[in-house]
Amino acid sequence: MAPPGRQAMQFQHDGKTLFLRGVNLADAKFPPGRPTYLRGSLDDAEKCSYIDAPLELKRAPEHLERLRYLGYNVLRLPVPWEALEHAGPGIYDDEYIDYIRQLVEICNKYGFKVIINPHQDLWSRHAGGSGAPLWTLHACGLDPDHFGETHAAIRYCEWPLDEPDPAKKDPKSIPPMMWTTNHNRLASCTIFALFYGGRDFAPRCNIVGEDGVEVNIQDYLQRRYYAAYARLAEKLGNLPFGYDGMNEPEPGYIGWQDLNVNEREHTAKIHSNPTPIQGMRLAMGQEQREVQEFRLGQTEDPRWPFRRSESWPLGTCVWALHGVWDVETGELKCPDYFAHLPHTSEAATKKENKADATPFTFVESYWREFHRQWTESVVRAHSAKTVSFMQPCVFSPLPAPSPPASAGSNAHPKSLTGQGEKLDHDQQMTLLAYSPHFYDGLTVMRRHWHESWNADVVGLIRGHYKFKAFGLRVGKGKVRKVISDQIGQLAQDGADNGVPTLIGETGIPFNLDGAKAYRVSRPSSATSSPAGSPIPSAEKQQNTALSSGTSEEGKGGGNEDSEEGGEGGGGDYTAHVKAMDALVSACDDHLVNFTLWAYSAVNTHEWGDGWNGEDLSLYCDETGSFPSHPYLAGARAPAAWCRPFVQTLASSSSSSSAPTSGATRARLVRMAFDLKTSRFEAEVDMDGGEKEEEAIATVYVPWLHYRQSDEDTEQLALQVQVADGDAWEVKGQVLTWRIRGGGGRRRLELERQGGVLSPRQLGTIIV
């Protein structure tokens, strides 16, 4: 069902309502050949190249053909800042930019809409995540080579931290999701505070750039950030469907109420867990847990064309420099330094007049303005037709979109036609969308599907409960509902602001329960059925597959003898299917667009996608599923995510080409798929249109769920029911539903003729 209150906004193109489903191309997060578990992956960072990340151009078609076959129509393409500007400030990798343009062109050729995602996690590979180039850390006075020994950041290739011999480092022994502890550690917290709030909280941290002009570190980094992505946007023009904002932006220390306490309880606490003040002391070489003494940033790096102003001496913690704590005594002098918004630089430095401090939220005071400038200087400056996606901090409410800074600031000097354009407020609103992320934290952190209990994490983080226990949900039905309710809340955020929602990232780890599903041999015969079990012959299925028709009576019966499938042992992906089905069904409930995390072309059982032990790829060549199928081979738990959905909807009165306009008479109001029965339902509200104004919906109907036999890779076994006067036809995996004119709601129902396929036939159990 759609969210309560306002009808969910949807994307529009050429008079059609689009329902976007796709994947993130995960292999773009680090340079090819430099997975995070390799000790040398961080060496010679200024020389790294991201060309062929995420896909080699010559091999891109085979992956795009697979993804298109699986029903997807949108791709989220991560582009880290480091990929654009790794060699130094203002030195761009134009060969990589040319590669990205070619890749986007190929994706468009295969029918995909592409969303460019300026990807980062925890600021940079050099801070234990991904994103920004090394020189940005040096600009902030940080030396990543000593992050491990001071616990300023955990870097995957340096585990265990207390092992001095590089040859004995063992990334495989690192606890699951250890990288997420970096959200609270000094490196990322300091850099994000400087990037978003340097002018307010670190006014003495000024940089003399390559142009000889002295500016605050906030302005220096943000200007370089905008310029790098503007370089890319200029080259791409109108090729992308949209641009995301910074991926999963973080406040760092901004808004922290008490530096003595680790108060952000939703952040993982694994291994060492220094409080902010402990992290600052550690970074200055003061023993907290017998950490070896050293000092950060003692010398300038000659590789970079910038230097610090005299107000920012090297070798001193930037927060001690601003009176937060005393390096000599270790005393925390201002525990609530980041809890108030200073009015002036003097107040920020001395913090003497608390009465003048202003209450604030990071999203409203810092992120909102950052995203406005991003949209105007990067997206709007080079494309008048591209959607700008808003992505505030994870699970933070979406603030109202910012208006343009000035009447003429929304000019488009390099539009598709080459003519300058200006957009009024209403036109700009049709080019905005919301792209929050949603993961079921319990499944991701514990690598186990808890189908009997869970929690309303969105509600807990947003303070909806007086007591935390009230956010707990117990019972299978309540677990699925709380996941749906949380995604519904995110969709409501978009609807309340008049913009459509696309969940930019959601998914599950496939190495659940100690990766026991991987312990299985590949099928030995390529002549067996795709998942190792035959499908009943056409004679046993009562009728041949329907290929077209009008309103039909009766429904196909379910397969009473289909296997339920256990949840233990090698080759069993039952738990994965349940976890993923809960996520995708929740998106169906609220008609939410999404791009799953993730698709990796190089995923392995041993190392996942190569980044910090993550293993969320829908595809892995080692899986052993559907060995004889050209597109399903290697699919993991596809029953949950390769499923029917409405792709487009158009009425004869629809004419808008604005990407997020709501101008269409026919509206999809419900969409649902039941794995247990193969039953799919869709409802369309014709909105009182004229009798002659029909609507046309296209529905993806996957061969995986509805195939007639293994031998015929095209024929489907469908039983379809529509209202009197409506008609339908099938071509390939697309069902076209023609809805007669007139008001009221119309329903499409379909099932597999002959009953639902078994878990083995769906690839849930691999033998």
Image (spheres, grey):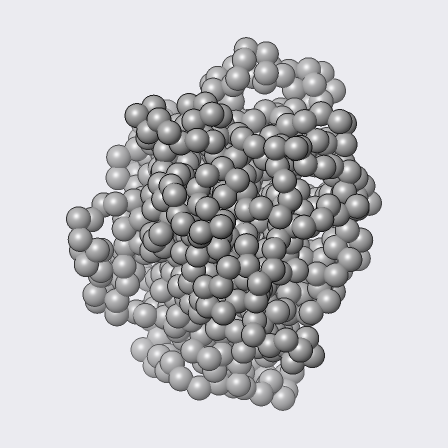
Where does residue 713 sit, x and y in percent of width and height? 60, 67
- Above or below 534: residue 269: above
* One can see residue 111 in this view: no
**Foreground residue, 601 or 635?**
601
Name the residue: 44% across, 31% down: 350
User: Tag count in the figure?
Assistant: 0
Name the residue: 37% across, 29% down: 352
Taking the view exactly as shown, the residue that stands out farthest to the front is 328
In which image quadrant can residue 421 be found? top right
The reply, left or right, for residue 401 in relation to residue 383 is left
Where does residue 583 sit, x and y in percent of width and height? 39, 58
Where does residue 716 sit, x and y in percent of width and height? 51, 63
Name the residue: 34% across, 23% down: 356
**Foreground residue, 70 or 529?**
70
**Foreground residue, 555 or 322?**
322
The reply, left or right, for residue 419 in relation to residue 407 is right
The reply, left or right, for residue 499 in relation to residue 66 is left
Where does residue 452 sit, x and y in percent of width and height? 26, 70
Name the residue: 60% across, 85% down: 522
**Foreground residue, 364 or 695?**
364
Taking the view exactly as shown, the residue that stands out farthest to the top is 407
Taking the view exactly as shown, the residue that stands out farthest to the right is 95
- Above or below 213: residue 530: below
* One can see residue 767 in this view: yes
